[in-house]
Each structure stands twice: as C-alpha cells, then as structure tokens.
Amino acid sequence: MTEKKFLELVKNVVKDYANKHLDKTDRKQITIDDVFVVWYCKTLQNWKALASTTLPDGMYYELTVNGDKEELYLDAYKKFENCCILLKGED
C-alpha cells in the first residue's frame, strides 16, 4: 500500500465512522475534507495514523493496518481533558 492510498483509506474510514455515529436528527454529514491526519508512519509492512475531524465532538481516531493479515483496525477515542502538569524541579 502506498502512502497516498493509506491516507485516503484513513480519511474515508474516519468519515464513514463519524457519519454513522452522528445524531440523525442533526441532519449533518461530514465529507473527506472534514477529516485530517495528525500523524502517521510506516514500520515494515504496517501503517499507523492518528486522525480527527472538524466536528466539535472531541473524538480522535487511531488506525492501524496489519500488513501481514491485510486488516485495518480502528480505535475511536473521546478526549475528556487536557491539563498541564508542571515538571519544574523534577530530576
């Protein structure tokens, strides 16, 4: 799988997942342009990416391609908090 095909796959899978889980009464659907990849890498035959959407739902997604089994795994996460922990003076 090429880098371009992987990133396209990631965006399509996240788009489809998000649209499937949106509240139908909102009458909103996202497009592939609403999905962005934050980070990705390839190690040997495996790919991994972190992605999110422009939706204000705090969700982010981890997608992993197992090249040996030709399988894609999707983990969907909700961000609950972002806090700062001071490390000043720690050694």
Image (cartoon, rainbow, N blue to C red):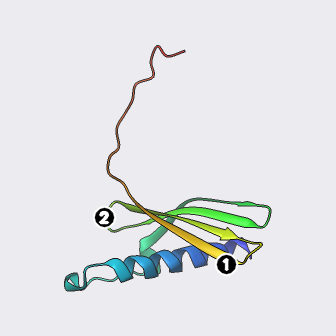
- First of labels 1, 2 by sequence position: 1
With respect to residue 16, does 45 lie above or below? above
With respect to residue 40, does 17 lie above or below? below
Callout 2: few (<14), some (14-19), or many (20+) C-alpha neighbours within 10 Å? few
Q: Position of residue 40 (x, y in %)?
A: 62, 60
Callout 1: few (<14), some (14-19), or many (20+) C-alpha neighbours within 10 Å? few
Identity of the amino acid at label 1? Lys
With respect to residue 30, does 76 lie above or below? above
| Front residue of this view, candidates 78 and 38 | 78
Q: Position of residue 74 (x, y in %)?
A: 53, 70
Q: Residue at x 34, y 38 (%)?
A: 83
Q: Find residue 7 and report its image quarter.
A: bottom right
Q: Residue furthest right?
A: 44
Q: Position of residue 27 (x, y in %)?
A: 24, 86
Q: Position of residue 14 (x, y in %)?
A: 48, 74
Q: CA–CA distance between discs 1 and 2?
A: 27 Å
User: What label does residue 57 carry, if any?
Assistant: 2
Residue under numbered circle 1: 5
| Front residue of this view, candidates 82 and 68 | 68
Identity of the amino acid at label 2? Asp
Q: Residue at x 32, y 51 (%)?
A: 80
